[in-house]
Image (cartoon, rainbow, N blue to C red):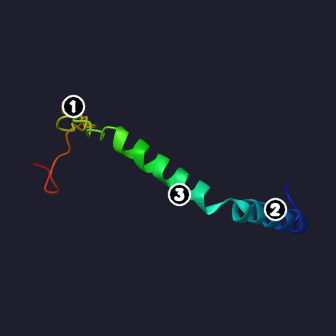
Amino acid sequence: MLSNIQATRWLQDAAAFWASLDVSLWREICSDLQVERKRQKPRKALNLGPMRVPSTVSSSDQVTSMDGK
């Protein structure tokens, strides 16, 4: 596990790396992501049909009413 000092240094290094990237490279990355997003077909939701809950009470386990009927 990273200590606080190691984590701080790692974050500073990462921030310095991202800040060093050229603006034109950022634009290229963003445009590539937009093209890829448009290329992917939207996913259809799975139609599982009506959900059925299995009965947990068998016919032999039926409960009588409070008055015993």
Answer with the quarter of the image where residue 49 lies: top left
Q: Is residue 11 above or below residue 29?
A: below
Sooner in the amino-acid sequence: mark 3 or mark 2: 2
Amino acid at dot 2: Asp
Q: Where is residue 30? Give x, y as percent.
A: 50, 54
Q: Distance from label 1 to label 3 (Cα)? A: 70 Å
Q: Nearer the viewer, mark 1 or mark 2?
A: 2
Amino acid at dot 3: Arg
Q: Distance from label 1 to label 2 (Cα)? A: 69 Å
Give the residue displayed 14% in from the left and 51% down from the top: 68
Q: Is residue 5 above or below residue 54?
A: below
Circles 1 and 3, Cβ within 8 Å, touching? The answer is no
Which residue lies under the disc numbered 2?
13
Nearest to the observer: residue 57 or residue 31? 31
Q: Which class describes the residues within 10 Å of circle 1: few (<14), some (14-19), or many (20+)?
A: few
Q: Where is residue 64? Give x, y as percent.
A: 17, 47
Amino acid at dot 1: Ser
Q: Nearer the viewer, mark 1 or mark 3?
A: 3
Give the mark count.
3
Q: Is residue 3 left or right of residue 17?
A: right
Sooner in the amino-acid sequence: mark 1 or mark 3: 3
Q: Where is residue 35? Give x, y as percent.
A: 41, 45
